[in-house]
Image: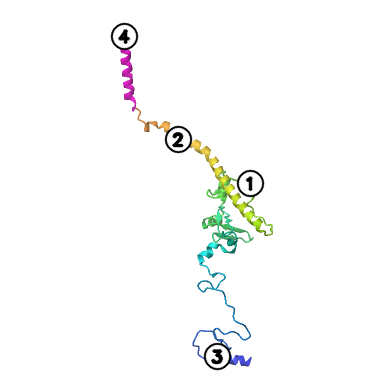
Amino acid sequence: MQGVSAVCRRLWAVPRLSKAPLSPFPARPVGAVAPGAGAAPRLPTGGAGVPSGRGGRGLPASSERASGGACGAARGGAAAMRIEKCYFCSGPIYPGHGVMFVRNDCKIFRFCKSKCHKNFKKKRNPRKIRWTKAFRKAAGKELTVDNSFEFEKRRNEPVKYQRELWNKTVDAMKRVEEIKQKRQARFIMNRLKKSKELQKAEDIKEVKQNIHLLRAPHAGKPKQLEEKMVQKLQEDVDMEEVS
């Protein structure tokens, strides 16, 4: 211990010419290999000398993002992502977006934007805010009861991975989503049918009440007078012939 401390004291006494950290051991030249070790393994580099691996696979950044990673390449270039739902308005939350709040009882609340987060902190009821999905479903403006909603549930049951099952599940999810969108659109169109009929009846009634704005009340009077004059002359001629 005495020898090491003495060396350290001598090193600290020498004025420092650089900011490199001091060490009591001799520095190894750059490129030298430690005794008893083989040649240092050389990392494979990309096109511009960047080491391969995360962030430098020898591909441009755009092509790496387009491939969607290893999972995306295995499924034809489509990146897999979990789309969460907003706790307040039930809107979609894509990866990297929104706010997540964890309460003291470990319950997780996700919000798509600060607007929903502020309304949640004000303890507002989503069923009473007109622009939320909860209000629209409670008011009968959107489809609420359908078999397609039974598929979209969180199931905490582990399933052994099988490639064929995975592909079939993804295809089934796309098909179920397509059917659900069509049924929702049909429900909305059927709901608007009655209002369109009522609106048409109101428009016809308004046109009948204000028909004088479209056609002048005395527009056809000269023609009617002319027809009456012709008819009267014809009657006079007939009377003369009879007499």
Magenta run includes residue 185: no
Q: For mark 2, give the secondary structure.
A: helix
Q: Residue 241 has which mark? A: 4
User: What is the C-alpha distance between the residues marked 3 and 1?
Assistant: 79 Å
Distance in Å between CA atoms under marks 3 and 4:
150 Å
Quarter where residue 107 is shown: bottom right
- Residue tagged 1: 147
| Badge 3 or badge 4: first in the primary sequence | 3
**Mark 2 sits on what residue?**
203
Amino acid carrying mark 2 in the image:
Asp
Q: Looking at the picture, does residue 226 appear above or below residue 167?
A: above
The kind of residue on which mark 1 rests is Asn
Provide residue 73's location: percent of width, then percent of height: 58, 62
Closer mark to the observer between disc 1 and disc 4: 4
Q: Quadrant of residue 34?
A: bottom right
User: First in sequence: mark 2 or mark 4?
Assistant: 2
Q: Which of marks 3 and 1 is in front?
A: 1
- Name the residue tied to disc 3: 11
The amino acid sitting under disc 4 is Glu
Seen in the picture, residue 243 relative to 174 is either above or below; the reply is above
